[in-house]
Amino acid sequence: MTSEVLVARGVSKSYRQGGNEVRVLRDLNLTVGSGETVAIVGVSGSGKSTLLHLLAGLDDLDDGVVEIGGQDLAKLSEGELSKVRNQRLGFIYQFHHLLPEFSAEENVAMPLMIAGKSRVAAVQEAGNLLEKVGLSHRLSHLPSELSGGERQRVAIARALVARPSIVLADEPTGNLDEDTADQIHELIISLAQNLGVAFVVVTHNHQFASRLSRVCRLAHGALDESSV
C-alpha cells in the first residue's frame, strides 16, 4: 500500500469580484500516494490553478486542510513552509520561470544551494539530473540559448533536484508545440516511474491525462473521478 504524500480535506476557496463572492472550490478532497500520477482536468476558469496554489501553500485556504508528508501547511511558520517547498515539493509552471542570468546547470542547482549544499555538490547533482532529462550537452547554456522544450526540461529538473515526494505541474506543456509536448509527457511519466515521485498535473491534454494513474475532473468546485 502506497504511503500518502499529499492529503487535502474539505478545501474551500472564494474570491471577491466586485461586490460578489465567487466560490471557486468547495469542500474538495484529494489524496495522492507515493509515486502516483494524477491528472486534473476541467474547463478554463474551473479553479485548477487555484487548487495547485493551495496544495503548494502559495495561497491561503478559506476552509479545510492540506498536508504534505503529514504536515498541515496552515500550521507551519513561513520558514517551515519554505523548507517544505524546498525539500518535499516541486512545482512546474506553464512558463519555465528560469532565472535568465544563470545557466541551465545553475538554475537546477539553485534549490540545493538555498538548502545549504555547497555549490560544487549542488552543481554536480544538477548535472546528473540534467543528464537524466537529456540535456547533458546544454549544461552551460543560458535559458535564452535553449529551445522551449529544453527550457521546460530544465524546469522539470529543477523541480526534481531536491528529490521531493511530490511535484505539482500547472499546464507544463501548454506553451509547447505538439511534438515537444509529447516528449515532455513521456519524460514526466518516465521520471515518475523511475524516481518514485508523485505528480499532480493540471492539463488540457486528455491523451496525456489518460496515461496517468488517475484522472480527476474539477467541476463546480469539487473533484470527480467518475465522470472522466
Image (tube, grey):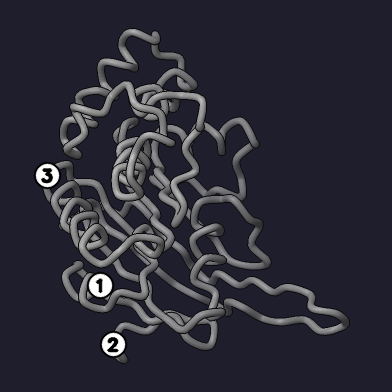
Check disc 3 and report the residue beneath it. 194
Q: CA distance from mark 3 to mark 2?
A: 27 Å
Q: CA distance from mark 1 to mark 2?
A: 10 Å
- Residue 2 locus on image (x, y percent): 19, 55
Q: Is residue 179 left or right of residue 101?
A: left
Which residue does the image show at 56% across and 50% down from the upper left?
Answer: 57
Query: Residue 36: image x %, image y %?
Result: 22, 58
Label 1 sits on a secondary structure element that is: helix
Kindly identify the amino acid type of the residue bearing the numbered disc 1.
Ala
Question: Which amino acid, mark 2?
Answer: Val
> Which one is in front, 24 or 45?
45
| Picture quarter with the C terminus | bottom left
Q: Earlier in the sequence, mark 1 or mark 2?
A: 1
- Residue 202 image point, x, y percent: 39, 67
Q: Are marks 3 and 2 in contact (CB under 8 Å)?
A: no
Residue found at x 26% / y 57%: 33
Q: Which residue is mark 1?
A: 209
Q: Provide the residue designation for mark 2.
A: 228
Q: Considering the image in quadrants, where does the N terminus appear?
A: bottom left
**N-term-proximal mark, 3 vs 2:** 3
- Residue depth check, mark 1 versus mark 2: number of the one nearer the observer: 1
